[in-house]
Amino acid sequence: MSQKNMQVTLASRPVGWVKESDLKIVESEIPTPGPGQVLVKNLFLSLDPYMRGRMNEGPSYAENVKIGQVMVGATVGEVLESKNPAFKPGDSVLGYYGWQQYGVSGGAELRKVDPKLAPLSAYLGVLGMPGLTAWFGLVDIGQPKPGETVVVSAAAGAVGSVVGQIAKIQGCRAVGIAGGKAKCDHVVNELGFDACVDYKAGNLTRDLAAATPKGIDINFENVGGEILDAIALRLNPFARIPLCGLISQYNEVRPRGMDNLVMLLINRVRLQGFIVSDYMARAGEALGDLAQWVGAGKIKYRETVADGLSNAPRAFIGMLKGANLGKQLVKLA
Ligand SMILES: NC(=O)c1ccc[n+]([C@@H]2O[C@H](COP(=O)([O-])OP(=O)(O)OC[C@H]3O[C@@H](n4cnc5c(N)ncnc54)[C@H](OP(=O)(O)O)[C@@H]3O)[C@@H](O)[C@H]2O)c1
């Protein structure tokens, strides 16, 4: 093959906000599969908030990216060459090849996906990690009951948009929190949430109270900071908080905590942090529901797609700042 493999590596560890210069576009040879290995041409790359954490030094639940290493990330693509009997050229696969056009690996971490059941990109979003996160966080940890009020922040994004729609399917009142009128209109008019609070409008506490007249039974937390503090004031006794993410703090040099912790005490609230990778053995439970709901039109999804790997750094920073509607992807080919 005369082509090269374009890659994006970590050039420096960001202090505070990520800069495009923290990431570097490089070229290498397209790898050759060894015995038992598969060569995949990646067609879509998923951009996710957790990648910001992987750019940091220091301990976390997963290993960080080293300087000079290709940025990690989930990909869907097509098998070009296989020395593994479980895969053949032309197979569509979900992998974890990172920010690059081609990847080589053994088959253990690859999963075949069916492009006839759903567009390939959906396996990185609603039928992939973000969909699983929404399902396990809400259904398993939140344990919604009909008539309860579920609030979800980052509601127009990949995880939040699915959380609110599952809440509706479970018979709950679904209230989103999102940045800007356009996102809130989308959340209510397209996704079917009962209400959406625009946290950028300047009246978060008042607007949240109006949107949650019976208080909050489940807070699916994606953001943290002042949004979590405002929500804490609306929690009902025995509310649940699946703590999924704290995106407002990922680029802060000194992340802030929670002001209104006492509200969790007096309301006997159960808060549980979770990482979706702990649930992979049970993924089938969630994927069955999600595939059925998407097929039946009960869950709708949007994608924001950057064109080409060279635009990935800008798209990643944009996603962290809220430029995306739905799942942020990069189209690689
Ligand atoms: N625990 C897990 O296993 C797991 C797995 C997947 C994702 N997550 C977490 O889930 C959350 C959502 O992830 P996602 O992949 O679905 O991303 P996403 O919601 O598609 O994109 C991120 C969104 O965060 C919002 N945001 C950014 N800064 C904000 C701020 N200061 N205040 C309020 N909102 C802000 C932006 O929306 P606005 O325009 O509305 O501000 C942006 O669109 C993240 O916290 C992520 O880390 C956790």
Image: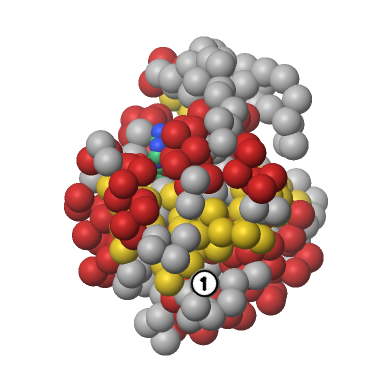
Q: How many numbered marks, from 0 up?
A: 1
Q: Residue at x 33, y 69 (%)?
A: 194
The quadrant holding residue 315 is top left
Q: Position of residue 141 (x, y in %)?
A: 68, 62
| Residue 150 percent across, percent down from the top left | 49, 64
Identified at 36% across, 53% down, the residue is 209
Q: Nearer the viewer, residue 271 or 33?
A: 271
Vertical comparison of 230 with 238: above or below: above
- Regarding residue 207, the answer to whether it shows in the image is yes
Residue 33 or 331: which is nearer the viewer?
A: 331
Residue 118 can be seen, yes or no: no
Compared across the picture, whether 27 is left or right of 184 comes to right
User: Can you identify the residue that label 1 sits on?
Assistant: 148
Q: Residue visible at 63% across and 64% down?
A: 142
Mark 1 crowd level (few <14, some 14–19, many ≥20, 10 Å Cα): some
In the foreground, 96 or 38: 96
Q: Reply above or below: 25 against 286.
A: above
Disc 1 secondary structure class: loop
Of the residues shown, which amino acid type is indicated by label 1?
Glu
Q: Is residue 296 left or right of residue 273?
A: left
Where does the image place residue 47, in percent across and percent down from the top left? Answer: 47, 43
Q: Is residue 259 above or below residue 139?
A: above
Work out which residue is located at the far front of the displayed protein and give it.
266
